[in-house]
Image (cartoon, rainbow, N blue to C red):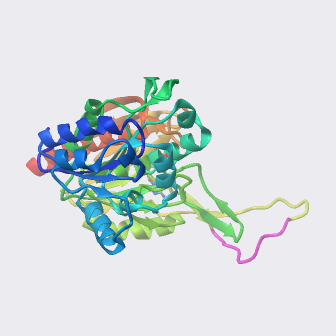
Amino acid sequence: MSLRGKTVVLGITGGIAAYKSVSLVSMLRKAECTVHVIMTKNATQFVTPLTFETLSNQPVVVDTFERPERWEVAHVALAKKADVFVIAPATANVLAKAACGLADDMLTSTLLATKAPLFFAPAMNTGMWTALPTQHNVAVLKERGCHFVGPEGGFLACGDSGAGRMSEPAAIFAAIEKLLSAADDFAGLKVMVTAGGTRERLDPVRYLGNNSTGKMGFALAQAAADRGAQVLLVCGMTTAEPPQGIECVRVESTMDLYQAVTSQAPEMDVVIQAAAPADYRFKEVHAQKMKKQHGMPLLLELVENPDIAAAIGKAKRSDQIFVGFAAETEKLSANARQKLEAKNCDLIVANDVTQPGAGFGTDTNIATLITRDEMTDCPLQSKRDLADVILNKVMQLRNSTVCK
Ligand code: PMT
């Protein structure tokens, strides 16, 4: 894959591994990328801006706050230019700032403003890397769809040995290349992804809900955006955070989800229903908190919600691809096949939610992809990796539909 013509914004933070980023810039330039380097003040203690300026053939932005009016314009301009934003080395400090959305210098302000995919190559002492706050920040950033390369284990500059070494420039380069190589196959396509569960109100304090965290839908939305799609995320109740930089509409109930999805579906090339909408809602929603019945059984009547997937399937154009999910606890493929037909899906992603590592809440999933012609088993893998496998299948289906 050629990185030719891509723009990489490279943030350098203050660590001895900054010297390795010199080779990274050189590799990127050889691959005919435009590289813009932003250095924190501390980073300039390890390598001079002139080194990066010479190699990148671009002015290096250093965090001096000397000319704030230019600074303001420059950070927005670089944020917009980036095809990918890489921070290498990434210190514990910059990971913490990124996780919290702090923007107190040029690098973190640009980082906060960008919609480009983010890559971190952490480098720090083992104790700092394994510290709970750092691991929490990494988890938050991963959940938001940020990518990580390394750190590797080995001998560290501080004399310790363990995890904390920045990955070699060749590994960082390969990871950037892999991300950007997938980046274009969805360019020009509009993709709607639903994520999370719905909440059906009973009274002001009680509801009917489910365990969906949104992670599967978020992984799909991020993967589609990374591959160049214009993504609309319709997001129910979630505990995970939606990925940054993707248009997100929030809904609460299945009826809300139905309205949002059916109004937008005609505009879409691909619709992916990873959400877990409630099949039923309460017939009566009480305006005040319901009181105990004192010994009397409480009978609550449920009425069926509209089937959103069935509605999309019914209205689907022949050039649209519609992906449904099936969350099953038994007879996985038979039930999923039945849903494929009943909802007129092109693809059903069937997950057995009783299997460890699959379904609700986990960062991983195990699935079977079912189309009218074939069935593909996808073993345990991260939801993000599965998202790419699903999108590959979508692209295959789209190509065969468009070629018909
Ligand atoms: O969010 P996570 O914690 O990451 O968990 C991921 C997941 C388990 C929620 C996801 O992988 C998944 O399986 N999503 C579908 C959950 C579901 O509702 O499955 P179902 O078999 O009940 O429904 C089948 C399909 O019909 C789904 O595409 C669903 O979105 C859709 N449906 C269901 C009810 C309804 N009223 N309208 C619908 O469109």
Residue at the outermost bottom position: 287
* Quadrant hosting residue 198: bottom right
Residue 271's spot in the image, x, y percent? Answer: 32, 56
| x 51%, y 57%: residue | 277
Residue at the outermost left position: 403
* Quadrant hosting residue 127: top right
Residue at the outermost right position: 294
**Is residue 83 rendered to the left or right of residue 250?**
left
Residue 264's spot in the image, x, y percent? Answer: 33, 68
**Is residue 29 rendered to the left or right of residue 49?**
left
Instruction: Give the number of marks.
Output: 0
Residue 290 lies in the magenta stretch: yes
Residue 154's spot in the image, x, y percent? Answer: 44, 21
Residue 21's spot in the image, x, y percent? Answer: 29, 39
**Is residue 397 rendered to the left or right of residue 117?**
left
Question: Is residue 276 in view from this perspective?
Answer: no
Image quadrant holding the N terminus, namely top left
Magenta segment, prevailing SS (helix, strand or loop): loop
- Relative to 253, residue 20 above or below: above
The magenta stretch is 283-292
| x 25%, y 56%: residue | 82
| x 59%, y 37%: residue | 131
Of residue 48 and residue 402, the one placed in the foreground of this image is: 48
Of residue 281 and residue 180, the one placed in the foreground of this image is: 180
Of residue 194 and residue 349, the one placed in the foreground of this image is: 194
Question: Is residue 180 in view from this perspective?
Answer: yes
| x 50%, y 35%: residue | 358
Residue 351 lies in the magenta stretch: no
